[in-house]
Image (cartoon, rainbow, N blue to C red):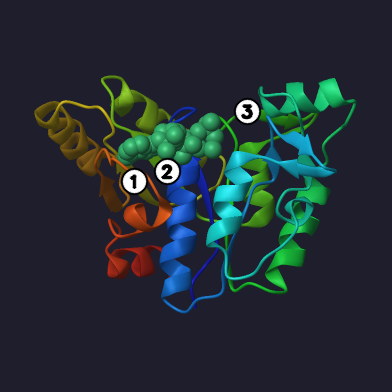
Amino acid sequence: MIRSCFVTGTDVAVGKTLVASALVNRLRNHGVHTVGMKPVATGATLEQGRWRQSDLEQLAKEGSFAFPGRVLSPYIFAQESAPQEAAQMAGVQMRIEEMVDAFDVLATWADVIVVDADRDFLDPLGADFDTADLARALDLPVILVVGITSGCIERALLTAQALRARGLELAGWVANIMDADPTQAQQHMDALGQQLQAPCLARIPRLDSPQAAAVAAQFPFDALLAALRR
Ligand SMILES: Nc1ncnc2c1ncn2[C@@H]1O[C@H](COP(=O)(O)OP(=O)(O)OP(=O)(O)O)[C@@H](O)[C@H]1O
Ligand SMILES: [Mg+2]
């Protein structure tokens, strides 16, 4: 049995959605019924009565089943900003129960749900809960995407410390190398490998065509399975 998981990152734009979509792709192609979910989607546009949001579309494209956007994301907002700000602008008070219910609906279809968190790990979502509370409420192990940059060691260690302090399991981490100098990137990854106390599930180089399938190919399946095995 493979567990669902919660993908977070050391920063915005570090490749969370790309990695979440790649995980959906990798598991689906292995015969596991998998879907990607995004509890809050910001920066959406309304086109002919239908909300469109790029992260949601990337995730939806890879899933084993097709669901309307509203099912994959209970909270879709037009404003491109931190989730709580976008909700306030729309006059909506987000509720953790709504997100858990949406997850449970997807869980009646899919064996594995990959949850793509918006923004930073400790971002507030509602008046009394943040992203970490959501991962706890869903009882999911966390996969941390680390954008390999000069400040990444501190950011990754702080995030790992924060999530463990909140009772969450760091099931593994992913190094997204993007623009880093190769020698420096290697040093950062070695240091993280020693200090994060969780397996590195993949090292993603800069890709000319950053598509889910290309990133999925960077994940050795045995390591992924070991991290997510129940
Ligand atoms: N290894 C890579 N090679 C090339 N492009 C990449 C790589 N990783 C990410 N990107 C690109 O960087 C951008 C940000 O990636 P992505 O949207 O997955 O980040 P994110 O962490 O989900 O961002 P956000 O915090 O805005 O949700 C995208 O355009 C993506 O295609
Ligand atoms: Mg994203």
- Say few, some or many: other residues with alpha carbon within 10 Å of mark 3 (under 14 / 14 to 19 / 20 or more): some
The x and y percentages for residue 96 are 78, 44
- Say few, some or many: other residues with alpha carbon within 10 Å of mark 2 (under 14 / 14 to 19 / 20 or more): many
- Mark 1 sits on what residue? 174
Front residue of 44 and 96? 44
Q: Is label 3 in a helix, a strand or a loop?
A: loop
Looking at numbered disc 3 in the image, what kind of residue is underneath it? Asp
- Mark 2 sits on what residue? 144
Query: Separation of disc 2 and disc 1 at Cα?
Result: 6 Å
Query: Separation of disc 2 and disc 3 at Cα?
Result: 15 Å
The image quarter in which residue 75 lies? top right
User: Residue at the spot x=30%, y=47% of the render?
Assistant: 197
- Count the marks: how many? 3
For the residues carrying marks 1 and 3, which lies nearer the camera in this image? 1
Q: Earlier in the sequence, mark 2 or mark 1?
A: 2
User: Residue at the spot x=20%, y=37% of the render?
Assistant: 189
